[in-house]
Amino acid sequence: MGAMKIGLQLFTVRDNTASDFVGTLREIAAMGYKGVEFAGYGDIPADEMKALLTELNLTAIGSHISLKQLEENLEGEIAYLKTIGARYAILPYLFEEDRKDEAAWLRLIDKLNTFGEAFRSNGIVFAYHNHDFEFTSKLDGQYVFDAIYERVSPEHLQVEMDLGWVQYSGLNPLEYVAKYKGRLPLLHLKDFRNGKPGEPIDTVELGQGDLNLPEIIEAAGKADVEWIIVEQDRCANPPLESVRTSKQWLDENYTR
C-alpha cells in the first residue's frame, strides 16, 4: 500500500477563507494537513500565495476551476497554478445547462480534451470531479462517468473520484476505485449519512457516516492514489472544527 498524503479541499472552510484566508491556511497547516486543494484564491496574488504555502510547508495540490473560468481565463488559471507549484487542475461541477442532454455531454467531452491538452503542455494534470449526476445519465449505454473517461485519453484527463457521491448513486465505491487504478491520483474522501438516492443527505465528519472508510482507504492505496483529500460539502459543526475532527479520525485510522 502506497503512502498517500492527506490534504483538504478548501471549499469545506469557505466561510473561514472568505473572512480570513491567510489565518485559515495557518490553522489547516497546524492541524497537520500536508496539502490544500483550492476553490478560489481569495484575491491573493500568486506569488504571495506561493510564499505563504512555503512558510506553512503546505503543498498546493491543485485547484477546482469552474467551466466558465476554464473557458474565459484558461491562461490566467495556468499561470497561477504554475506560480504556486500546483500539479493538478480540476473541473469540479457542471451546471444543469452544461449536462442537460447527450449533445451537451458530447460538447463537454470535446472541451475536456482541449483543456487537458493545454494543461498537459504546461506540465499540469487535468482531472474531473464527479457528483451523482454522472451516474444518472448515460451515453451510448454507459454511465456518463465511464463514457467521459473512455472518450478522453488519460494524457488529457485523470480522475478525482468523490466516493461519497459514488455510494450515494447506489454503486460500489470499492469497485470504482479498483476500476480506475493508475488513473486516480486524487480521491475525495467524505462521509455521508442517510445517503440514499432521492432522500435528504447529510455530509458528516469522517467516521460518522455510512461509508466503509477503512476499506476504501485500503483500496485507494492499492489503486496508487497519491492524495486523500478531505471534503465536507456542508458542516453542521463549525467548519474548522469539522476538518479537525476528520483529520484526527485519519490520524487514528490510517497508518502511513
Image (spheres, rainbow, N blue to C red):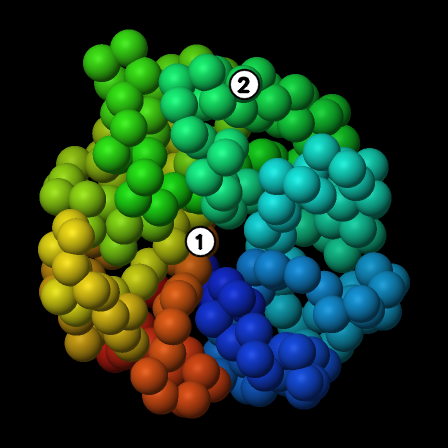
Report crowding for label 2: few under 14, some 14 to 19, many 20 or more residues within 10 A (C-alpha): few
Give, as a three-letter code, the residue at label 2.
Arg
Mark 2 sits on what residue? 107
Q: Position of residue 195 (x, y in %)?
A: 16, 60
Left or right relative to 249: residue 193: left
Task: Please identify, in this view, whether the residue under mark 1 or under mark 2 is nearer the observer.
Answer: 2
**Residue 161 - label:** none
* Dot 1 and dot 2 residues touching (CB under 8 Å): no
Secondary structure at badge 1 equals strand
| Left or right placement of residue 57 versus residue 75 in this view | left
Q: Residue at x 86, y 64 (%)?
A: 45
Q: Along the line of sight, which residue is nearer the eye, 130 or 102? A: 102
Residue 204 in percent (x, y) is at 27, 74
Specify the amino acid type for callout 1: Trp
**Residue 61 seen in the figure:** yes
Q: For mark 1, what is the residue?
A: 227
Q: Residue at x 43, y 60 (%)?
A: 229
| Circle 1 Cα neighbour tier, 10 Å, few/some/many (<14 / 14–19 / ≥20) | many
Quadrant location of residue 116?
A: top right
Position of residue 234 relative to residue 69, above or below, is: below
Residue 120 drawn above or below residue 205: above
Say which label, 1 or 2, has the lower sequence index: 2
- Determine the residue located farthest toward the top in the rendered image: 140
